[in-house]
Amino acid sequence: MAEKRVDADLGTIVHVVGSRQARPNLPSVGCPFCVGGLEAPEPYDVRWFSNRWPAMDGDRCEVVLYTSDHDATLPSLGVSGVRRVVDLWAERTAELGARDDVDYVLAFENRGAEVGATIAHPHGQIYAYDHVPQRQARRLCAGWTPDPHPGERLVTECSGWRAWVPFAPTFPLAVEVAPVERLADLPSMGDADRNALSAMLVDVFGRLDALFDQPLPYMMWLNQRPTVGDGYDDAWFNIEIVSPWRSAGVQRFIASAEVASEEFFNPVIPEDLAGRIRRLG
């Protein structure tokens, strides 16, 4: 069973999940996400299922398989393949968000052993929270908008979507993606919006994999309107992508001073990073 605890002084929420200590780090035989595997007995294009090792109780944790191709990447799926993933994210957001005990739906992905991924098959996860996490509450509150003038930090802009390197990233490699005009969440996006988002993700992740001429380990998460009744009418959908790599195969580790102070030291100049990614287009 999971237990949610709150630090009385800092307000930090910690989910204590002792059962996850017993989960396997790597599948012992084969890939459970390939067709015929434990989690994918039948052929599929995209697929979701409940996580066997949930971080929270109450059917709040799901796994999303992007493709049956074990060696694929997000950009290799092409716009049509990523669009299927976007549609599945939207479908699960709508269904989970309709529950009375769900206030926020977070779709996210860890790719690469460097960020804790234990299975290489292209996949992500979804967590359905019974509260709005503090970071999303701050980022999606009234008045927050994506960087309107990134200048030298702009990566690319196309079909109403923009990608840029943030002004003060805590990770050495960080890219944000958002629509130029406000869209609140995945379920409310129409066909044109979803197609444009899919094309932008293919573009951005293609650049990121080309940055070091090898697959980039990364974390990605989608910030979208909470599913509570009110208070977030001005929420602006956005995606954050970060990587611990400061150069090819070289990981930057967070230092004790940074954890202690919650002030970070980044060796990579955001404007330089943006220029390198931009030129890869």
Image (cartoon, rainbow, N blue to C red):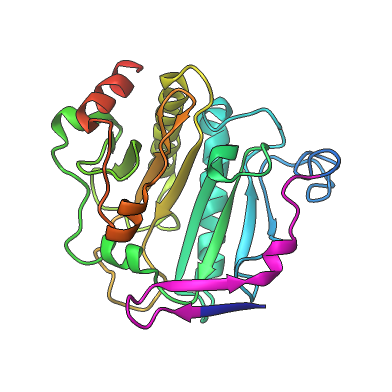
Magenta residue check for 221: no
Residue at the image position 34 percent from the left and 69 percent from the top? 134
Q: Is residue 196 left or right of residue 84?
A: left
Do we see residue 82 in this rendering? yes
Residue 159: name its quadrant.
top left
Q: Quadrant of the N terminus?
A: bottom right
Which residue is at the far front? 256
Place of residue 73 in the rendered image (x, y in percent of width and height, measured from the top left): 58, 30
Q: Position of residue 85 (x, y in %)?
A: 56, 44
- Which quadrant is the C terminus positioned in? top left
In terms of image quadrants, where is residue 200? top left
Is 119 displayed left or right of 178 in the figure?
Answer: right
Foreground pick, 168 / 232: 168
Please tell me whether residue 18 is drawn above or below residue 254 in the rendered image: below
Which residue appears at 68% of the width and 28% of the height?
Answer: 71
At x 58% / y 34%, what residue is drawn?
Answer: 81
The magenta region covers 5-27
Tell me if 31 is positioned left or right of 109 in this view: right
Q: Is residue 26 magenta?
A: yes
Q: Residue at x 39, y 46 (%)?
A: 254
186 or 58: which is nearer to us? Answer: 58
Q: Is residue 250 shown above or below 105?
A: above
The correct choice, above or below, for 122 with respect to 140 in the image is above
Residue 192 locus on image (x, y percent): 39, 41
The answer to whether one can see residue 235 in this image is: no
